[in-house]
Amino acid sequence: MTDTTSNQMWGGRFAAGPDAIMEAINASIGFDKRMAAQDIAGSRAHAAMLAATGIVSDSDAEAMREGLLTVLSEIEGGSFEFSTALEDIHMNVEARLKAIIGEAAGRLHTGRSRNDQVATDFKLWVRDQLDATAKGLLALIDALLTQAEAGADWVMPGFTHLQTAQPVTWGHHMMAYVEMFGRDLSRVRDARARMNECPLGAAALAGTSFPIDREMTAKALGFDRPAANSLDAVSDRDFALEFLSTASLCAMHLSRMAEELVIWSSAQFRFVALSDRFSTGSSIMPQKKNPDAAELIRAKIGRIFGANVALMTVMKGLPLAYSKDMQEDKEQVFDAADNLMLALAAMEGMVRDMSAHRENLEAAAGSGFSTATDLADWLVRVLGMPFREAHHVTGSLVALAEGKGCDLPELNLEDMQAVHGDIDASVYDVLGVHNSVASRTSYGGTAPEQVRAQIARWKEALK
Ligand code: ARG
């Protein structure tokens, strides 16, 4: 026992204060102080509503308003003294308000509870994060579009199983990530629209007998409407989970792209050079330039998806309505949000700065018999062969080239005709990588004209 005074906010029925361990496990102020601005915004909206409905006097509401602004400036200025004994941001703010304005502060908590208060604060915080995430995604998409535009017709190998498959264009590869991050953006927007209902006024769990105006507080805080069920309003953390699941998908996309940058920037691939600004050196090997930012982005999914799993696990099995378990929601979301923002910004910087080695991409695009499918398609189109037979004939030609240690375009016509007599010189037209990509004009295909059309569509959509 370290403290014998009972809590000034709820200690009426208590003869003794909490044990130090109780205080340590119970307090959230160490982290929920990040929601100070949201807490004060919520209290200001509540105070104004209490006056408008005649629940408190105009002069009390005015004192609350002034006092809350003072508390906010103390917190922002760093002079505010946070107290663990006061548990959380809600009671820290209210206690300080009381010290500044006196008795009137005691009327602020009329018709509300910390349960609807924390749900409101946290929703406001998550909503800001969704907006910041959307901004980060837009910046990254813009950087990818710039890369795609510059290299809409540069050829590079396309892979399946990380084995050379068919030539594709650099622009097409960049645009694949635009599609992925574009879906993340739409998930962020969906989540924001769905979560934008205000819990304030749900009170502890059952609503209140005071004639509050929930439309008014919802509107003041930028919500579309008040949440319709008070039990659900205080026990819902779907908005945090939707943020975390959206963040997890986005982090997974970032991780895949980061992995490609790690591979592409290696001495064995040399597809891209990362800028000095987004690389590090080795303290022992002077030649090294390491893609640390990409590696760390690749790893961020660990903690972000971990947060998603952690909060899902906290919430499963909780009976309605509020339980203190739910206090474990914030650190996970804060950490995931911080790291997602950092990963998005680092990826944007890397993508903006990186330069593709166009000649290396092109040389790699032609190796590994990457135009074998074009050859098979030619046999189908020009000689009228069934695709299965064409596949077989092409396989024999690949084996022949492999035996000779050359690529398909280097086989001479006699060699080809030895495999199939009807092959003529026009086959060479389809064996080059530029013709290969130019021929893939189907919607969404890798042909430069398709890539440019997709870039234009995205630019229009993002206007
Ligand atoms: N610090 C608490 C949390 O983060 C605030 C709500 C507390 N409510 C309560 N009834 N004890 O969840």
Image (spheres, rainbow, N blue to C red):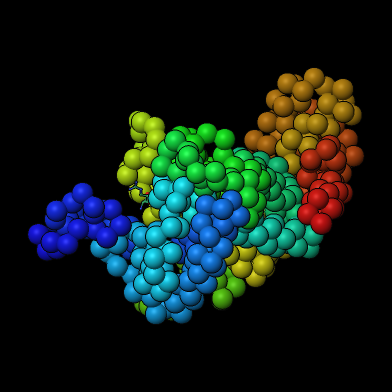
Q: Seen in the image, is 447 located left or right of residue 236?
A: right
Q: Residue at x 60, y 73 (%)?
A: 275
Location of residue 282 (image quadrant): bottom left
Q: Compared with residue 293, is residue 460 higher up or lower down, i.e. above or below?
A: above
**Between 429 and 6, the one nearer to me in the picture:** 6
Can you see residue 430? no
Can you see residue 324? yes
Q: Compared with residue 433, is residue 261 higher up or lower down, i.e. above or below?
A: below
**Between 76 and 136, the one nearer to me in the picture:** 76
Residue 158 image offset from top left, x and y in percent: 67, 46
Q: Compared with residue 349, is residue 247 higher up or lower down, i.e. above or below?
A: above
Q: Compared with residue 5, is residue 385 higher up or lower down, i.e. above or below?
A: above
Q: Seen in the image, is 215 located left or right of residue 245?
A: right
Q: Seen in the image, is 328 located left or right of residue 68?
A: left
| Image quadrant in which the N terminus is located | bottom left
Q: Residue at x 68, y 37 (%)?
A: 398
Q: Residue furthest left?
A: 1
Q: Residue at x 84, y 53 (%)?
A: 460
Location of residue 190 (image quadrant): top right
Q: Residue at x 46, y 79 (%)?
A: 77
Residue 149 image offset from top left, x and y in percent: 79, 59
**Count of residue discs:** 0
Residue 378 image offset from top left, x and y in percent: 84, 33
| Image quadrant in which the C terminus is located | bottom right
**Between 255 and 141, the one nearer to me in the picture:** 141
Residue 195 image offset from top left, x and y in percent: 58, 43
